[in-house]
Amino acid sequence: MNSIHKISLFQFRNYASASFDFPEPVTCIAGLNGSGKTNLLDAVYYLCYTKSCFTSYQQNCVQTGMDGFRVTGEFTREGRKEVISAKWKGGKKELTANDAEYEKITDHIGLYSAVMIAPDDTELINGGGELRRKWMDGILSQADKIYLEKLIHYQRLLLQRNAWLKAQAFRPTDNTELDFYNAQMAADGTYIYEQRSAFLQVFLPLLNDFYHRLSGGREPIEVVYTSDLSVKPLKDWLTQNLEHDLRYQRTLRGIHKDDWDFSVNGLQLRQFGSQGQKKSFLFALKLAQYAYLTKVQGHLPILLLDDIFEKLDQNRMEALLRIIRSPDFGQVILTDTHAGRIRDAFGAGANVGYINL
Ligand SMILES: Nc1ncnc2c1ncn2[C@@H]1O[C@H](COP(=O)(O)OP(=O)(O)O)[C@@H](O)[C@H]1O
Ligand SMILES: [Mg+2]
């Protein structure tokens, strides 16, 4: 189990300078709206992944009017204490473990992990495919460095291939360059497709289990992975679809179009699901992510729950509490506007620490 005991923030979001202790195993951050609860959770997330869960612009994490921030956390990893410190200033990131600077920041990825469940996550069900791809890619990249490398490579090739397609409209060339892109993309894309397919085999039973524990029902759920590559190999798409690609000046087929279709009781969740079904499904997705990461990384991630009690009815809340208090779960940090609600939910005498903002 990995856990965080203390965090210090400097010029991070609304925090000029502050430190907080996290008494294990459950810490509740209580405070009014706008008091910085989500920001504090995000700072923990940042130390695990060296990025915010909510923004890809690092500058947004800097307290307004300042030119950089620092976040430092005291962790326990595999039984040993470790201080992780991340500094961002003027577009440059610096990351240290026990004061030693990482040569490559990516070496940090996979050592610590956190799963965040936040109110806006319903987009994972209601939003477009790009969000789901990003989410799946995030999980797969943590489990497999090669996946991440190939994904980045594929995305770069895709941009280059699209630029080539555009250029043909006014400056046609022979296909030497294209053949190169096609071959490389086919190799990377096939690997990614295979990993995404294999992932689902492991992920689906976990998802199924959590969904039924949360909803208390037996309704069948399904996740269908849709990919052009299940029709024919990417190499064939890229060569046979060239005419279309040239007309639209972009690559129309490939793993960058993959998506996942969620359904409950044989009906598509996005269109036909009830609010309750969507909630159970969303929480099940995140809990399955947690269980999957535990499996592949061999340690329990930190679970970050942002304002979730606001959204859950009594039954789901009780089911969620039973799940996260089982031995399959580690440290939990959660936020709520009412400390009293958490106290009631966990029961008197439960080992819950409080941070009052
Ligand atoms: N970069 C920033 N600099 C200063 N304040 C910020 C920054 N980003 C967000 N905030 C402030 O942080 C507060 C929101 O914090 P948040 O963690 O979302 O609160 P809560 O989750 O408790 O409702 C807002 O008042 C917002 O203006
Ligand atoms: Mg919040």
Image (cartoon, helix red, strand yellow):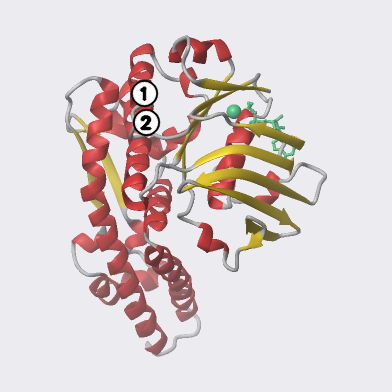
**First in sequence: mark 1 or mark 2?**
2
The answer to whether 300 appears left or right of 261 in the picture is right
**Is disc 2 surrounded by few (<14), some (14 to 19) or many (20+) residues within 10 Å?**
many
Image coords of residue 282 (percent x, y): 36, 32
Residue 128 vs 331, above or below: the answer is below
* Residue occupied by mark 2: 283
Q: Which label number is shown at residue 66? A: none
The answer to whether 286 appears left or right of 85 in the picture is left
Give the amino acid at mark 1: Leu
Image coords of residue 162 (percent x, y): 45, 71
Q: Quadrant of the N terminus?
A: top left
* Residue occupied by mark 1: 320
Q: Nearer the viewer, mark 1 or mark 2?
A: 1
Q: Residue at x 64, y 21 (%)?
A: 33
Q: Residue at x 56, y 22 (%)?
A: 353
Give the amino acid at mark 2: Phe
